[in-house]
């Protein structure tokens, strides 16, 4: 799983979010399988739109650095090899 952090409730977005204390950023507290599916869907969209791919490749690379869950990492590696 990803680095543990404090889970907070974001009242503006009406969803639970995870506070990553190391980077002082807020990340979604989604299950790894759901996040892997989201990256897969985003990757399919990136195959169709080159400008979207250029924008999102940095966030995918950052997710590889931050997340330790093998499901999410494997999905992103597969997208990078496409």
Image (cartoon, rainbow, N blue to C red):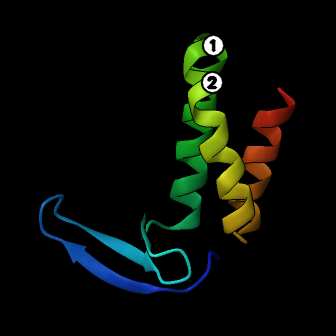
Q: Where is residue 66 in the image (x, y as percent from the top left)?
A: 67, 67
Q: Residue 74 location in percent, x, y?
A: 79, 53
Which residue ends up furthest to the right in the rendered image? 81
Tell which of 8 and 32 is nearer to you: 8
Q: Is residue 28 left or right of residue 49?
A: left
Disc 2 and disc 1 in contact, CB within 8 angstroms: yes
- Residue picked out by circle 1: 50
Residue sitting at x 87%, y 32%: 81
* Left/right of residue 82 with respect to residue 16 in the rendered view: right
Q: Distance between the residues labelled 2 and 1?
A: 5 Å
Residue 53 numbered mark, or none: 2
Quarter in which the N terminus is drawn: bottom right
How many numbered marks does the figure carry?
2
Q: Eyeballing the image, is 66 above or below 60? A: below
Identify whether 51 is placed above or below 55: above
Q: In which quarter of the image is residue 79?
A: top right
The image quadrant of residue 50 is top right
Look at 73% across and 47% down and name the residue there. 75
Lateral position of residue 78 relative to residue 1, left or right:
right
Spot occupied by residue 8 in the image (x, y as percentages of width and height): 28, 81
Q: Position of residue 34 (x, y in %)?
A: 51, 56
Q: Is residue 67 above or below residue 58?
A: below
Screen quadrant of the C terminus: top right
Give the residue displayed 80% in from the left and 35% down from the top. Answer: 80
């Amino acid at each position: 799983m990803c680095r543990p952090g404090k889970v907070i409730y974001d009242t503006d977005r009406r969803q639970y979010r995870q506070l990553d204390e190391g980077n002082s950023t807020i990340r979604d507290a989604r299950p790894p399988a759901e996040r892997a599916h989201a990256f897969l869907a985003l990757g399919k969209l990136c195959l169709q739109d080159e400008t979207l791919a250029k924008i999102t490749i940095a966030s995918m690379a950052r997710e590889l650095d931050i997340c330790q869950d093998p499901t999410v990492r494997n999905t992103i590696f597969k997208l990078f090899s496409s």
